[in-house]
Amino acid sequence: MSYIGIIITYVFISNFILTQFLGMCPFIGVSKNVESAVGMGFAVTFVMGLASLVTWAIQYYVLVPFNIVFLQTITFILVIAALVQFVEMVIQKIAPPLYKALGIYLPLITTNCAVLGIALISVRSSYNAIESFIAGISGGLGFLLAILIMSTIREKLDSEDVPKVFRNIPIAFVTAGLMAMAFMAFDKVLLKNLIG
Amino acid sequence: MFNTILYAFISVSLLGAFFGLGLAIAARYLYVKKDQKLTDLEEALPGYNCGACGYAGCAAYAVAILNGEAEDIALCAAGGAESVQKIADIMDLTVDVSSEKKVAFVHCRGGKDTAKYAFEYNGITDCNAAYSMFQGNKVCKYGCLGLGSCIKVCPVDAISNDKDGLVVVDKEKCISCELCVKVCPSGVMKMIPYTADYVVACNSKDKGAVTRKACTVGCIGCKICEKKSPEGGFKVENFLSAIDYSANGERKNGADACPTKCIVSTDKIAKIILKKAV
């Protein structure tokens, strides 16, 4: 599969949030304003790209040669946790306002199943190193796209006359459902027509 | 078999050690100095994270105090005078901490056997939901709906249901955060001083005759309490007696004389809670 195919697959067709429903917690939690949503999106993209590269290396240089592939989940989680800690420190150092805006959701990327998801999916699809990295980045970009759309809609919703019982979280869930339906328009047929 | 165990052990340990070391080095280079005052402030606050101060949590309030963004250092109701004093010491401010501790109290005793119900409510167990439907299922529109929205918001579990289908607040546990006051749709939850001996347990501003039809323990505004305990601070307004707690006179005579027995002693409420605990 070409690189473009991978990008289109993970940004649109198997979008982590809207098609595979992975990593919903920050998607609802940090989508209240565009600025922090974009910050979160890039943090997740960074972690996913790096994590899929590192987990690829661990899979093929440690787990497979020693025949201990059953340790996949625990080692991948270890990698992701360490990476998130690292990203947290970097963000706290270079962008304190973003660190404050992301709050508890930043360390929670550790348990964001989208990150573990991309690592496991890359391995299962037997991608090579570059393909895994691209899959990771595009998975993150898909997350960024979804959370950006969501936060823009939610900012608009703030000024709308939403019925009282639907305000805040309930209307956000309804919005997420509608967005997921819209993303069903992207499927494998589209990919075939686009790149053959 | 043994090799697998060995490899698994070694590789996971090495990976763990590698990442641990990497993070330790990164932590050293990316260290952000934390203000000692901020740590002290966080310790001075009680750490319930109830949000009554208007900030996201105790840590957020501490930051606001430190940056001078907080309009007042006495916003923490839960910490009370003690934590305000500590904050003042840390920030080198002088503060008057004489204000009295307040606790929440449900100003309604009209339960299953005493209050009349207009219809049967079968909706979700939430006072605000019930209140949006004809202001609740009681004939009296001022009383406690007993569905326990306050129980859910209370950060310290001080509120519980009683056998009459009402709720009671344990004043020993109450941290005066006023979250229950904010969530209550009928406004029956109000703050009283911790030391209060008697409370007018009614919130009905209807005329006496109307109240009497809706509930047998409602205040009908007869003003007998005003006459029997003139020093007690009783004041009837809108057909509802209220106690001014700055008056220190006796209130027992007024309470005993109340024809509907809606003036209850806080000891009696404490006994209800004690009985539940046993």
Image (spheres, coloured by chain):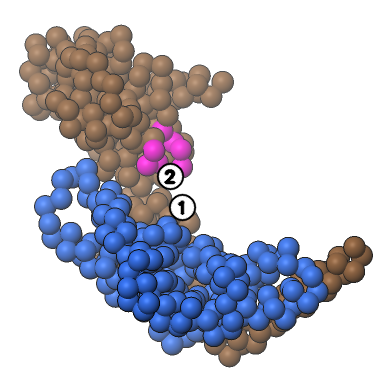
Chain colours: A blue, B brown
Q: Chain of mark 2?
A: B
Q: Is residue B19 left or right of residue A84?
A: right
Q: Is residue B53 above or below residue B138?
A: below
Farthest-out residue, bottom: B29
C-alpha distance separating marks 2 and 1: 7 Å
Q: Is residue B214 left or right of residue B238?
A: right
Q: Are marks 2 and 1 in contact (CB under 8 Å)?
A: yes
Q: Which residue is mark 1?
A: B48
- Residue A59: percent from left, percent from top: 68, 75
Q: Which residue is mark 2?
A: B155
* The C terminus of chain A sits in image quarter: bottom left
Between B192 and A182, the one nearer to me in the picture: A182
- Residue B36: percent from left, percent from top: 51, 77
Q: Magenta stretch?
A: B152-159
Name which residue type carries label 2.
Pro
Name which residue type carries label 1.
Tyr
Q: Secondary structure at mark 2?
A: loop
Q: Earlier in the sequence, mark 2 or mark 1?
A: 1
- Residue A152: percent from left, percent from top: 23, 68
Query: Would you call the spot at circle 2 few (<14 residues within 10 Å), some (14-19), or many (20 or more)?
Result: some
Between B128 and B248, the one nearer to me in the picture: B128
Q: Which quadrant would residue B245 be assigned to in this image?
A: top left
Q: Secondary structure at mark 1?
A: loop
- At 26% from the left edge and 43% from the top edge, which residue is drawn? B182
Residue B156 among those drawn in magenta: yes
Farthest-out residue, right: B2
Q: Which quadrant would residue B16 be assigned to in this image?
A: bottom right
Q: Is residue B11 above or below residue A153?
A: below
